[in-house]
Image (cartoon, rainbow, N blue to C red):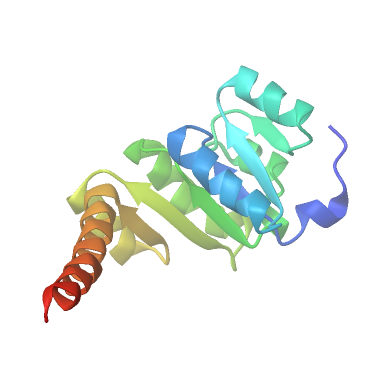
Amino acid sequence: MSTDQALLTGQVVLVGYGRVGRRIAAMLREEHIPFVVADENRERIDALRKDGIPAVSGDASAPEVLIQAHIARAAMLVIAVPDAVSVRKMVEIAPTLNPTIAVVLRSHNEEEADLLASESRAKVFLGERELAHGMSEHIRLSYRGAMSAARP
């Protein structure tokens, strides 16, 4: 696929276009942030390409897939897949292909999240922590608002 080189410099490489990846991609589009999707599902990749979104098919824990996504010139690698083994490989490979790349990833396991955060420069998001944080913030703000309204 022929893609404008301006979209392949300083872009986000988004690995995974499932439930989380689709939401991230929607925000990237809204913010006009260029991105390339890497996903193993060939049908998803074909659909993305039809929509004009740069996308590569394959397992992004393989260096050649990240290379096809132009990771060497990317600003950020966002890993939206939950597979801990693949995530570890990507976290190891990415800095060898682009020493300045910022890495953002998700984890479903607290131990793994803490280990990845301590071993790499990655910003790690743990689903349960993020959910608890968001709910707590909503409760804090809503409770204060409700208590203020209830006071005479």
As drawn, 85 above or below 148: above
For this rendering, which residue is in front, 152 or 28?
152
**Quarter-wise, where is residue 97 in the image?**
bottom right
User: Most extreme residue toward the front, as rendered?
Assistant: 152
Q: Nearer the viewer, residue 73 or 36?
A: 36
**In the picture provided, is 139 more to the left or to the right than 67?**
left
**Looking at the picture, how far across and down is residue 47, in whole percent?**
69, 24
Question: Where in the figure is residue 58, as x and y percent of width and height?
Answer: 59, 28
Looking at the picture, does residue 80 appear above or below residue 47?
below
How far from the left and from the top, in percent, is residue 104?
A: 46, 57
- Outermost residue toward the bottom in this view: 152
134 lies left or right of 8: left
Residue drawn where x is 26% and y is 62% of the image: 138
Q: Is residue 30 left or right of residue 40?
A: right
Residue at 20% x, 56% y is 132
From this viewpoint, is residue 60 visible?
yes
Q: Quadrant of the N terminus?
A: top right
Q: Is residue 121 left or right of residue 73?
A: left
Q: Is residue 12 visible?
A: no
Residue, x 36% and y 35% (percent of image)? 83
Which image quadrant for residue 151? bottom left
Across and down, in percent, residue 88 comes to: 39, 46
